[in-house]
Image (spheres, rainbow, N blue to C red):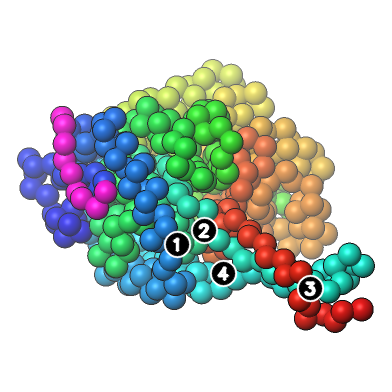
Amino acid sequence: MLHDVLKPAKADVPTEAPAYVAGRWTSEGPPAKRVGPFVRDVVTHSYPATAEQLETAREFARDGARMVAALAPATRAAVLDRAARLAAEYRAGFARLIALELGKPVKDGLGEMDRVADTFAVCAGEARHIGGENVPVAGWARGVGNTALTYRAPAGVALAITPFNAPANLLAHKLGASFAAGNTTLVKAPPQAPATTAAMVALVLEAGMPAEAVQLLHGGGDVGAALCAASEVAVISFTGSPETGAAVARAAGAKRLVLELGGNAATIVCADADVAHAAATCARTGYTNSGQSCISVQRVYVQRERYDEFLATFCTEVRGLTVGDPLDPATDVGSMVDEDAATRVEKWISQAGAQGARVLVGGGRDGATLHPTVVAAPPADATLVTEEAFGALVAVLPFDTLAEVVDTCNRSRFGLQAGLFTNDIATIIHAWRELQVGGLIVNGSSNYRLDHVPFGGVKDSGFGREAPKQMIDDYTVIKTLILRGMSIWGQA
């Protein structure tokens, strides 16, 4: 199946993205058509789940959970190691498919697949380290003469709901950690990337993941809501917007949740920074995947005495980005996910201009392709300052003192990740302590992530941490054993 999904499609024949339910690939019912945002034609057919398929998937997951839990951690780790090798082997085919479905430049798709390989490898390592604890019960009088042990048991059935912007790597995190923990996983694919998701499921099956460990369902919010409400599901990992995250929580009820809900990332450039390096870094990371990343550089605050210098250098760097066909290896910026998304960001740019901001670079679009845009000194209440843009724009604003800019950043309802350019350790420690974000990147922009490092936010950016080790904690439950009258600690 992996070869079928990844083989280069003929120009007039869309790629088929079947569902995978109860150990069988299926293409039942009328197809949903995915239009590639750059090619402006149908590139994928997927098949939304029916009520019958949802019921079948639930039953199969309930029964399969026991089989997957019985697999030794070494067995799970071996499958994930093979998945890592396959991700590296098929990286070019995945990158091409991602470019067609999403308009993401192939160079970015290749980078995403390198991260997929790393993520699966890290999940394999974490599977080998799942254990428990010998609890020191004899430290209290009532515990003397007893022994207490714990171990981390699989939660059972996990639900992974993935977004379109990094469909391969974010699924690798959710599915890889869930399987490492010994769970079976229901995967709800993003409608914008059904074939990429199908290819990822085919990859793990080819790596040896048993059919009982994973199922794939396509569809919209109704399918997601039905899966969230399913009584068999014990834990849900969701990445997406705050509004959809709230809907997930309402549908889920009393279930364990890991929610990564987006951001409005700020990067701070202090007066002592290497401004040329900061400008080049922000230009490179502010427009990756057309800014469609929850940690993409959206706001850059520059200390006033270096503001003009940064702005001039930054604009030069942005003008040097290559915009065009995402299948061209030279392209830096392709298209956004669809024309509606590009139109929304274009409107925000126009509104900021009408409020007195200066649009120094870009500002226009061609279909779903938004030209990389630099907006200087927008008002603090401009939509592109207060909300998540998720598009190819960066706002650059001046600040005077560290206390002022920290307070400004903290007014945002989001708090995922921030960047800070400075060489002053006191500034670093102060910002790390005071900024209301889940992570701070020093001498780098907000848009930097290592897949084995804890990642997540505060406030409307969600809760929980997406890294294999922390996710395994969410995907497992602690089971305790107390041996009364049997003690390794002594009897008196």
Can you tell which of label 1 and label 4 is closer to the viewer? 1
The residue beneath circle 1 is 69
Camera-nearest residue between 371 and 48: 48
What whole-number distance in Å separates the C-alpha atoms at marks 1 and 3?
30 Å
Q: Name the amino acid type tagged 3.
A: Gly
Residue 187 shown left or right of residue 479 in the figure: left
Q: Are marks 2 and 1 in contact (CB under 8 Å)?
A: yes
Quadrant of residue 377 within the rendered picture: top right
Q: Nearer the viewer, residue 288 or 22?
A: 22
Label 2, secondary structure: give it.
strand
Question: Which image quadrant for residue 249?
Answer: top right
Please state which amino acid type lies under the numbered disc 2: Pro
**Which tag is nearer the camera, tag 1 or tag 3?**
3
Separation of disc 2 and disc 1 at Cα? 6 Å
Residue 116 in picture, x, y percent from top left: 39, 62
The tag earlier along the polypeptide, 1 or 4, is 1
| Amino acid of disc 4 | Ile
Frontmost of labels 3 and 4 is 3
* Residue 130 numbered tag: 4
| Alpha carbons under labels 3 and 4: distance apart | 28 Å
The numbered mark, 1 or 3, whose residue comes first in the sequence reads 1
First reached walking from the N terminus: tag 2 or tag 1: 1
Q: Which residue is mark 3?
A: 485
